[in-house]
Image (cartoon, grey):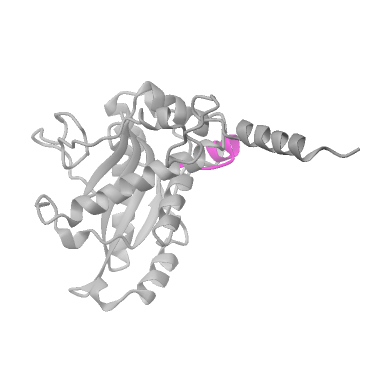
Amino acid sequence: MGMTPRIRLFLNWLFHRQSQTCVACGTLAGNFSEFTGLCTRCSNQIPWVYNIRCVHCGRPTFCPDCVRPGRLARYYVCNRSATSYTPMMREWIGQFKYRGNEKFGPLLGEVMNRAYQAMRHEFADPKCTHFKRSLWDVDIVTCVPVSKKRLTERGFNQAQILAEEIAKQNKLPFLSLLVRPQDTGKQSFKSKKERMNTMNNAFSVHPNMANLMKRFILKAEPQHAVENMYSVTILLVDDIYTTGSTLQACARVLREKALEQGVHLAIFCLSLARS
């Protein structure tokens, strides 16, 4: 005998109920937020970076690094971070990055896209005087690469997934412009000086970068050409911002290679969490 309609409805409801489990806290929740698979309670705990004290690195507190005399030249315009690196965000990123919990991918991608929209709003605001508004018109989205070793271990590049989500949501091209020839180990265990030394030669441009850029320039509109050079704005995406040494190293090799091709890059950075 088949199931009665009432039993079938009950089982469908039960299955649907079980599928509505919050990816973060694991509880069955009747009220879900705008973020995929996240309950309202967990959504309200996202530690967004709202008040930016340092316009260069996006720090929500006073930044002694960006104001110190003799600071090294920055190869990127600025960084913004979606959230603070609280224990909760450390757990979420760890679930996604190290434990391969794919359910966190769409969630963190949506968090990044929210931060990207905040960046657009910030630089479109007439009151924004710390950077030229004309710079903010992203042409290409790219990301910090991982080494072949890390890619084999994890099976994916977490920064690339975040970058591709931003590109998809905003109809922007995503291009892999960088490679990481060797594994530099976990940077969280190193001092700031050690990080900078490690990152000096950690990255190189993708072998096909010149062709990728050329293909983009051929499609570009005339306003990208300024004083016999093409001007391209890039959004460089990473998961965690600590000292900025990773973004600095990536931006340096990108800009140096682009200049060889007659292209001036304005690089804006967006990271998921700010430690």
Q: Does residue 84 appear in the picture of this structure? A: yes
Q: Main secondary structure of the magenta part?
A: helix
Q: Position of residue 143 (x, y in %)?
A: 41, 48
The answer to which quarter of the image holds residue 233 is bottom left
Question: In terms of image quadrants, where is residue 272?
Answer: top left
Q: In the rendered view, tell whether residue 234 sits above or below residue 95.
A: below
Which quarter shows the N terminus?
A: top right
- Left or right of residue 212, residue 117 in this image: left
**Residue 274 coordinates in the image, percent (x, y):** 30, 32
**Where residue 166 appears, x then y in whole percent?**
40, 52
Drawn side of residue 136 relative to residue 190, left or right: left
* Viewer-side residue, 254 vs 274: 274
Indicate the position of residue 110 as horizontal and vertical percent values. Answer: 42, 44
136 with respect to 34 (left or right) = left
Is 198 in front, or is 140?
140
Q: Is residue 246 above or below residue 262?
A: above
